[in-house]
Image (cartoon, helix red, strand yellow):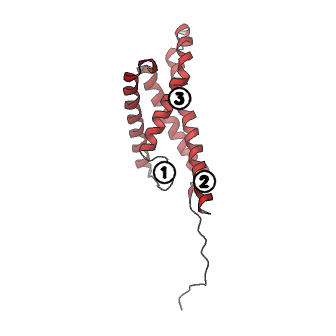
C-alpha cells in the first residue's frame, strides 16, 4: 500500500515537473521570437540553436526549484513562502546559467532573450501552480488513512 502511494506521488510530481519544463521551454522560444521578430534573417539563424538552449534553461530553473523544495510532496507552502521560493529559484537558476554561459560560450542565449524568458517563465510557472492547486486541490498528494476499531465515545 505504501509503495502504491509513493508511486502515485512520484508520478504526480513528475507530471508537474514535465509540465513546468514545457512551460519554460516555450517561454524561451517565445522570448527568442519576441526579441528577434523584427530581424527575420537573424531570427532564423538564432532559432536553429534555440531548442537545446531552451532545454538547458528549463533544466537549470527546475533544478533550482528542486533545490528550494518546490517539488516536495510533504511540504505545504504558504503563498508568500511559495512566491519567495519561486523568485529565489529563478535567481539561482539565472546565476547558474550565466556561470554556465561563461564556462561554455556556445551555449550563450543572450541577455535580452534570457531576461525575457525568465520573466515569461516565472509568470508561466506561477499560472501552472495556481491551476494545479485549483485543479487538484492537493488531494492527490494527501495521505489517506483508515482507522478500524471500536467506537471510542466517552461514557
In the image, farthest residue toward the top: 41
Q: Is 14 left, or right, of 74 in this rendering?
A: right
Work out how far the residue at label 1 is from the one at label 3, CA to CA, in angstroms.
22 Å
135 or 101, nearer to the observer: 101
108 or 126, nearer to the observer: 108
Please report whichever mark, 2 or 1, sits nearer to the chain's N-terminal start: 2
Name the residue: 53% across, 88% down.
154
Q: Nearer the viewer, mark 2 or mark 1?
A: 2
- Which picture quadrant has residue 152? bottom right
Residue 20, given in percent of the width and then of the height, sits at: 54, 38
Q: Secondary structure at mark 2?
A: helix
Please report whichever mark, 1 or 3, sits nearer to the chain's N-terminal start: 3
Residue 75, given in percent of the width and then of the height, sits at: 46, 55
Residue 112, disc: none
| Quarter of the figure that contains the C terminus | bottom right
Name the residue: 38% across, 36% down.
92
Name the residue: 51% across, 20% down.
32
In this figure, which residue is indicated by the disc labeled 2? Answer: 7
Residue 54, given in percent of the width and then of the height, sits at: 52, 26
Amino acid at each position: 500500500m505504501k509503495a502504491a502511494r509513493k508511486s502515485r506521488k512520484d508520478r504526480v510530481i513528475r507530471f508537474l515537473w514535465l509540465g513546468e519544463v514545457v512551460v519554460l521551454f516555450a517561454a524561451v522560444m517565445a522570448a527568442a521570437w519576441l526579441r528577434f521578430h523584427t530581424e527575420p534573417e537573424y531570427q532564423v539563424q538564432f532559432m536553429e540553436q534555440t531548442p537545446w538552449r531552451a532545454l538547458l534553461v528549463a533544466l537549470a530553473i527546475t533544478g533550482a526549484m528542486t533545490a528550494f523544495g518546490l517539488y516536495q510532496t510533504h511540504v505545504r507552502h504558504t503563498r508568500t513562502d511559495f512566491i519567495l521560493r519561486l523568485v529565489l529559484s529563478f535567481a539561482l537558476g539565472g546565476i547558474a546559467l550565466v556561470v554556465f554561459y561563461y564556462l561554455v560560450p556556445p551555449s550563450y542565449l543572450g541577455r535580452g532573450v534570457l531576461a525575457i524568458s525568465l520573466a515569461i517563465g516565472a509568470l508561466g510557472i506561477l499560472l501552472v501552480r495556481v491551476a494545479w492547486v485549483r485543479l487538484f486541490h492537493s488531494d492527490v498528494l494527501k495521505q489517506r488513512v483508515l482507522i478500524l476499531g471500536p467506537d471510542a465515545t466517552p461514557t
